[in-house]
Image (tube, helix red, strand yellow):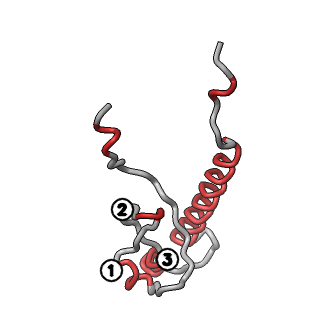
């Protein structure tokens, strides 16, 4: 029988709620993009002109720095016209963990 004191020290509901909200926001933005791209609004605008919506998004890899900071590469900041102090929305997906203590297991 497992001991109940071995459970997580943080409330799983808090993590789940934050993750679900981020996922819902990302899904909503993707749906809006597809609607704009394929003209579900009934407009006769061409697909190339709708591709302009993609110019407001970027995907890139970056490393987590001390204190949990991440950096947006220069090329992406310039392409998206992002300046210091601007507020941006991010979705973070870990792709590789680089920890010394994991390699010893």
In this view of the protein, which residue sits in the foreground, 66 or 24? 66
Measured along the vertical axis of the image, is residue 75 above or below residue 63? below
The residue lying at 31 percent from left, 44 percent from top is: 100
**Picture quadrant of residue 78:** bottom left
Relative to residue 78, is residue 103 drawn left or right? left
Evaluate if marks 3 and 2 touch, with contact meaning CB atoms under 8 Å apart: no
**Compared with residue 70, is residue 104 higher up or lower down, i.e. above or below?**
above
Q: Looking at the image, which is closer to me, 36 or 56?
A: 56
Q: What residue is drawn where x is 34% and y is 40%?
A: 101
Identify the image quadrant of residue 102. Answer: top left
Q: Which residue is mark 2?
A: 63
Query: Could you tell which of marks 1 and 3 lies nearer the N-terminus?
Result: 3
> Which one is closest to the eye, mark 3 or mark 2?
2
Q: Which residue is identified by label 1?
A: 75
For mark 3, does the 10 Å Cα neighbourhood hold few (<14), some (14 to 19), or many (20 or more) residues?
some
Q: Which residue is mark 3?
A: 53
Q: Position of residue 52 (x, y in %)?
A: 46, 80
Residue under the point 51% across and 70% down: 37
């Amino acid at each position: 029988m497992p001991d109940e004191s071995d459970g997580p020290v943080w409330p799983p509901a808090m993590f789940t709620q934050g993750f679900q909200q981020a996922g819902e926001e990302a899904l909503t933005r993707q749906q809006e993009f597809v609607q704009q791209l394929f003209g579900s609004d009934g407009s006769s605008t061409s697909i190339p002109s709708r591709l302009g919506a993609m110019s407001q998004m970027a995907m890139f890899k970056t490393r987590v720095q001390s204190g949990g900071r991440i950096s947006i590469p220069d090329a992406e900041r310039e392409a998206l016209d992002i300046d210091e102090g601007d507020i941006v929305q991010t979705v973070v997906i870990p792709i590789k963990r680089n920890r010394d203590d994991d390699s010893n297991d």
